[in-house]
Every structure is written in structure tokens, then in C-alpha cells.
Amino acid sequence: MTEVIPAAKPIIGDEEREAVDRVLRSGMIAGGPEVAAFESEFGVQVAGGWQCVAVNSGTSGSHLGLLAAGVGQGDEVIVPSFTFAATANSVALTGATPVFADIEPETFCLDPAAVEAAITPRTKGIMPVHLYGHPANMTALNALAQKHGIAIYEDAAQAHGAQWQGQSVGTFGEFGMFSLYPTKNMTSGEGGMVSCHDAEFARRVQLLRNQGMERRYENEVVGFNARMTDVHAAIGRVQLTKLAGWTQQRQSNAKFFDENLEGVVIPVVVPGAVHVYHQYTIRVVDQDRDAFAARLLELGVGTGVYYPIPNHRLPSFNLTLDLPQTESAAKEVLSLPVHPSLSSADLEKIVTAINSLTKAGVR
């Protein structure tokens, strides 16, 4: 059987294991000093110095951030349909309505023109997704938000360290959310981080994650149990020290693909954008994408299709909308392995497999 290069590969080493053991030996397993240290370090290294609040998942981060921003029943938040369902789910969970807008074909991120067309008197905010690690056009989206008096909420789940015009993603609006799921550019085992535009906003998120209380048994609001444990934070702290090096390796791997792949549409990096390549996502055109992926697997190259069903067509939303760029991307995208564990031989194998198939013309 051909050994398969995995599409994603979490990197967990001895340092992470030692960090977990340190916490277990301490007896402080729930939220404690590790969480506080992780929040501070993440804010400095990833979120432009913003105050951060650790939670138990990226979805919780978006959900609590939206609630802290006052989003609720009767509001609308404009989101892309071409993303993971958690983006729209987090809006719907507040009681608000996710309004789906189309994407730019080059970056797979929200199209500002489509966003403006979707704005109504009920629009509370815009939630761009920095998809695959490429930042959305925050210059244009911020201008729209200011023009119409609405807010920006960032889904940076896949974009740790990405920048737009020199500014870190997660620092353009009221809050940003970063996922720490195992397949992301760094992980805490499971978890999320909310970057907050001021201390009062951070306090609201802190209340919401901890049953609505800052002091024990003095519940100020109705809240959730969405805390991060010290075990998870300890893993995240170690991973954070490696993030910059891993990002450079992802960018180096992407550069190799850029220079050597043939017959597919490679990712675009817009001038002024720093792409962190959570995924290296190509378009397979003039061929059957799924057949192409199946043949790559036979040749030992794992891939991922993110996302084959646009959110607006999922049974949970089931809307009939005209989003042509979204539909096109859903049919054509294919994400290749780009993770830091790839060897030079792996990179050569991936390129050779793809170029052989494009020349052969898989149908």
C-alpha cells in the first residue's frame, strides 16, 4: 500500500507533554495561571497587543464575542457562505440572522461589493473570514462599516499571524476569534482565543465564558461554561513559541508549490497581505475535482475539500441564493498538504503527482 502524505498533521512533541505533566502535578487543572499566561502571550505575539480571552473552542469564541457585542434577536450579520458552518452557526446561536454574501474568487474571502449589496437597516455587523490563512480586504470592509455605522467581527480561526497592510488580523473590529483546534497552525488540543478591542469588552467575554460571574457565586449575567483548562493552555503556550517558525515553513512550502505546480490555479497573495497558509488551496478547473483528488490519494497524496457545500445550501439554513463565486469555489477547490512536517521528498512527491495528473487530463 502506498504511504499517504496527510493533508494535515498536528505536531505534538516532548515539550507539550512535559507542559501537561507540569500542570497535572500542580493540581491546578481548571482555569488558572497557565490560562492567564497564555492569554497574555497570545495577545502580544499574535493579536497585536490586544487583550485576549481564552475559551474552550473557536466556535465558543465567535458566539461569546457576538453576544458581548450585543448581537441578538432581530439583528443581521453578513457572513460568507464559503467557510466552515461555525461562522454562520455562531451568529444564529445569538438569535440573529446570518446573511450570506459572495466571495472574491482570488482570495476566497468576502467580496466588499457583495457585502454592501447585502446591508439592510437590520445589519448589525460584518463577519469576514480570513479563509485558508489569507486576510480579507479589511481596508474596504472597514470603510463599509464606517460608512453604514455597523461593526466588524473577525473570524480569524485559520489565520494566526496573518496581516493586512501591516496590521494583525483580529485587530480590525470589536473582536477577533482564533481557533486552536488540532489541525490549525497551532493548537491547544482544543480551544479558542478572543482578541478584544478594550478591557470592558474583554470583561464581558470573561463573564460569558464563566457562568456570568467574575467572583464566585456573584453571577452578573446569564453565561456559559466555555472556559479553557490549564492543561489546554499549557499545550498552547508551548505551541505559541513554535508558531513563527512553523509559519515560515508553511510559507516556504507554499513558495515551492507556487514555483513548480502546473495545470492548476495556485493561491493568490494580494499585495500588502501576509498569507500564513493554514491551507494551500488550488483550483482544479477543466477537470473533475473529486476524481483528481481520488487519483492523488492513489498516488500517496492526501488532500482536503474545504468546503464542498456552501453554508446557505446546508440543511441547517437551506436558502436559495445567487452566489456564483461561492458555488464555483465549492466545485473547484482542493487543499494540498502544506504543514511544517513535510520533507523535501514529500514536496517533490506532491508536485510530481499533481503535474502528472494535469498532463494526463484526469476526468
Image (cartoon, rainbow, N blue to C red):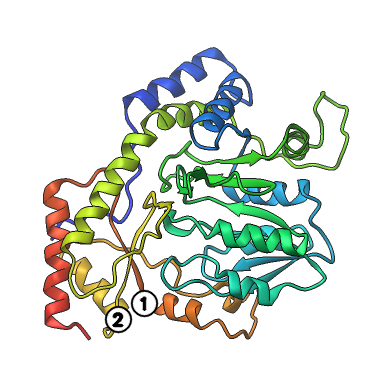
The foreground one among 23 and 288 is 288
Residue 84 drawn above or below residue 62: below
At x 30%, y 47%, the residue is 250
Q: Dot 1: what SS?
A: helix
The residue carrying pointer 1 sits among few (fewer than 14), some (14 to 19) or many (20 or more) residues within 10 Å by Cα, namely: many
How many badges with numbers are in the image? 2
Task: From the image, tell me which residue sits under label 2.
Answer: 285
Q: Do the residues under discs 2 and 1 have CB atoms within 8 angstroms?
A: yes
At x 52%, y 50%, the residue is 157
The numbered mark at residue 166 is none
The foreground one among 46 and 84 is 46
- Image position, residue 46 (x, y; %): 50, 36
* Relative horizontal placement of residue 238, taking residue 262 as reference (left or right): right
Q: Dot 2: what SS?
A: loop
At x 12%, y 81%, the residue is 360
Task: From the image, tell me which residue sits under label 1.
Answer: 332
Residue 138 drawn above or below residue 324: above
Location of residue 293 by image quarter: bottom left
* Relative horizontal placement of residue 256, taking residue 67 as reference (left or right): left
Amino acid under disc 2: Val
The foreground one among 299 and 77 is 77
Q: Is residue 125 visible?
A: no
* Relative horizontal placement of residue 187, taking residue 282 as reference (left or right): right
